């Protein structure tokens, strides 16, 4: 081995970087999200499985429909009408952002910027 | 090229069908990724150690500038480094700025016939764009593997999603990644000279990485998957605490295709040209100081029993034959033995 010291140091650094998540987590999988489902309601806008994976696509579609196509036709869940809106649609049922949306988003480290402008329920200016 | 393309399609199909079989989800989600990762690290270390064992008896840096000489001749320090510190700067520029690729030229034959060389930066631009996007994408993926996620990755996510287009936000690197890879592929098709020297070993990694990018983009923007369950699996892989079967069942097929292609890449990596990741650090033409005139480098496999043989000694041994053959000698034969002419 020529320049063995340097090469082996380099290799150890490389393997250390590659296995970064292993020693960062330290064998602890951390807390899982415990989102609180709305009480008294049984169904979401779309089937739960679809909401779970694709709610952001739906929000994006609503936003385009409401603001670009002026289509604010209310939608119906369980025979009740809701507004096509983030603040008064989704949050009408999911009343606690922290205990619902944020639980998942913190876990998967997503930070929707929607709340730069939109208010979560019960927040006062 | 045809075969590389079909090979990647076959890999996609294997994962697509495999993930449908109930019991095989844990094979594609756990066993294969673990094996692939071990092969990747093991193969990588093996290749690097193998290179480390090859002797580099002399300094063979490629120089494209004035070497260290007399005091009044300006040395080009980073093109022809003479000290360790200068080599380090040259290596940093090479690794982070792809400096030797920046010197890429294009040669063309014009009517005349006249051969022309001109600077060509497109390859450098696409190459460096691709590599930085790859790096940022892989770093951003750490959000799936670490819980809680380190803060610098949040900063990367924010910067990358800066355009705030749509939901989920479009990442700038996703667009540039596909764009740069497409350029690198088209270059091999359009340029006849490059096409002539392109083989499966060139096309296969391009197709493989491109399809990893495409499946990832499909998964994020079009065929949504359950990212919460995927994170449970990914964190589980790093902590040896695997998620329950019902969590695995929530993960869509697109993810298994993406992951299987990544596993293929990891297994293929150490045995392919992609090893330039390690190779760049061990390139004798880059990492040696050009100090052959200042330091004596002794060939490591020299037999110490063989004594140095100077030219004067050589001439002493063979003077007569040399003179007979009409070769010039520094010291003439003694007068007495001079043949009569
Ligand atoms: C060679 C390494 C990899 C490359 C180049 C790659 C590339 C990509 C790209 C370009 C995307 C699009 C979204 C984004 O940029 O974040 C993506 C998404 C994704 N990748 Fe990968 N990937 C790699 C490895 C992995 C691995 C090992 C996993 C296993 C956990 C994985 C899981 C995912 C998931 C779940 C998504 C969707 C994320 C979302 O919806 O936001 N990728 N990938």
Image: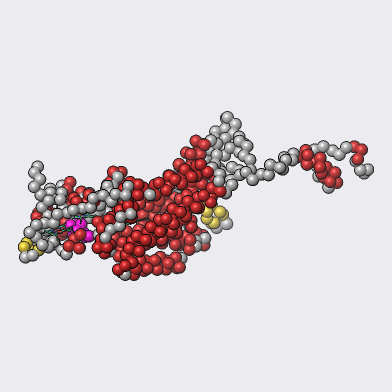
Residue segment shown in magenta:
A53-60
Kindly tell me whether residue B215 is visible in this rendering: no
Q: Nearer the viewer, residue B200 or B14?
A: B14
Q: How many marks?
A: 0
Please tell me whether the stretch drawn in magenta is mainly helix, strand or loop: helix
Give the residue displayed 10% in from the left and 62% down from the top. Answer: A42
Instruction: Give the image location of residue B111, x and y in percent.
Output: 55, 58
Q: Nearer the viewer, residue B176 or A102?
A: A102
Q: Is residue B315 above or below residue B258?
A: above
Where residue B28 sits, quadrant-wise, is bottom left
Instruction: Give the image location of residue B281, x and y in percent.
Output: 49, 46
Residue A116 shown in magenta: no
Instruction: Give the image location of residue B107, x and y in percent.
Output: 52, 53
Residue sitting farthest toward the right = B340
Q: Is residue A58 above or below residue B105?
A: below
Instruction: Give the image location of residue A62, x and y in percent.
Output: 16, 58
Classify residue B112 as left or right of residue A26.
right
Give the residue displayed 31% in from the left and 63% down from the top. Answer: B254
Give the residue displayed 68% in from the left and 42% down from the top. Answer: B304
Q: Quadrant of the C terminus of chain B?
A: top right
Where residue B70 sits, quadrant-wise, is top right
Q: Is residue B325 above or below residue B257?
A: above
């Amino acid at each position: 081995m020529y320049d063995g010291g340097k090469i082996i140091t380099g290799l150890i650094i490389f393997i250390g970087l590659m296995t970064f998540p292993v020693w960062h987590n330290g064998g602890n999988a951390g807390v899982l999200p415990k989102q609180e489902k709305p009480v008294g309601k049984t169904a979401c806008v779309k089937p739960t499985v679809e909401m779970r994976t694709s709610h952001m696509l739906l929000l994006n579609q609503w936003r385009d429909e409401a603001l670009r196509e002026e289509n604010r036709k209310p939608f119906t869940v369980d025979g009740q009408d809701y507004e096509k809106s983030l603040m008064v649609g989704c949050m009408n049922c999911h009343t606690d952002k922290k205990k619902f949306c944020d639980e998942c988003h913190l876990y998967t480290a997503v930070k929707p910027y929607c709340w730069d402008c939109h208010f979560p329920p019960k927040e006062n200016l | 090229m045809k075969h590389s393309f079909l090979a990647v399609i076959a890999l996609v199909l294997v994962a697509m069908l495999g993930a449908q079989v109930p019991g095989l989800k844990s094979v594609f989600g756990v066993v294969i990724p673990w094996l692939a990762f071990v092969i990747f690290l093991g193969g990588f270390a093996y290749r690097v150690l193998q290179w480390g064992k090859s002797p580099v008896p002399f300094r063979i840096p490629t120089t494209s500038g004035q070497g260290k000489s007399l005091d009044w001749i300006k040395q080009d320090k980073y093109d022809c480094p003479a000290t360790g510190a200068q080599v380090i700067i040259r290596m940093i520029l090479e690794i982070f700025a792809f400096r030797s690729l920046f010197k890429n030229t294009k040669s063309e034959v014009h009517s005349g016939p006249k051969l022309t060389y001109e600077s060509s930066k497109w390859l450098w631009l696409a190459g460096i764009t691709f590599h930085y996007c790859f790096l940022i994408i892989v770093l951003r993926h750490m959000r799936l593997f670490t819980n809680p996620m380190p803060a610098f990755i949040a900063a990367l996510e924010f910067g990358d999603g800066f355009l705030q287009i749509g939901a989920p936000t479009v990442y700038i690197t996703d667009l540039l990644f596909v764009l740069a890879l497409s350029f690198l592929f088209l270059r091999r098709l359009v340029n006849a000279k490059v096409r002539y020297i392109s083989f499966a070993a060139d096309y296969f990694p391009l197709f493989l990485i491109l399809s990893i990018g495409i499946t990832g983009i499909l998964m994020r923007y079009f065929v949504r998957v359950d990212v919460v369950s995927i994170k449970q699996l990914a964190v589980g892989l790093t902590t040896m605490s695997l998620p329950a079967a019902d969590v695995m069942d929530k993960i869509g097929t697109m993810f298994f295709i993406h992951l299987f292609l990544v596993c293929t890449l990891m297994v293929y990596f150490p045995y392919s040209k992609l090893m330039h990741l390690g190779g760049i650090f061990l390139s004798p033409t880059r990492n040696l100081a050009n100090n052959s005139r200042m330091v004596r480098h002794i060939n490591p496999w020299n037999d110490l029993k063989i004594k140095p043989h100077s030219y004067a000694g050589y001439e002493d041994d063979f003077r007569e034959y040399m003179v007979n053959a009409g070769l010039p000698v520094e010291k003439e034969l003694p007068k007495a033995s001079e043949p009569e002419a």
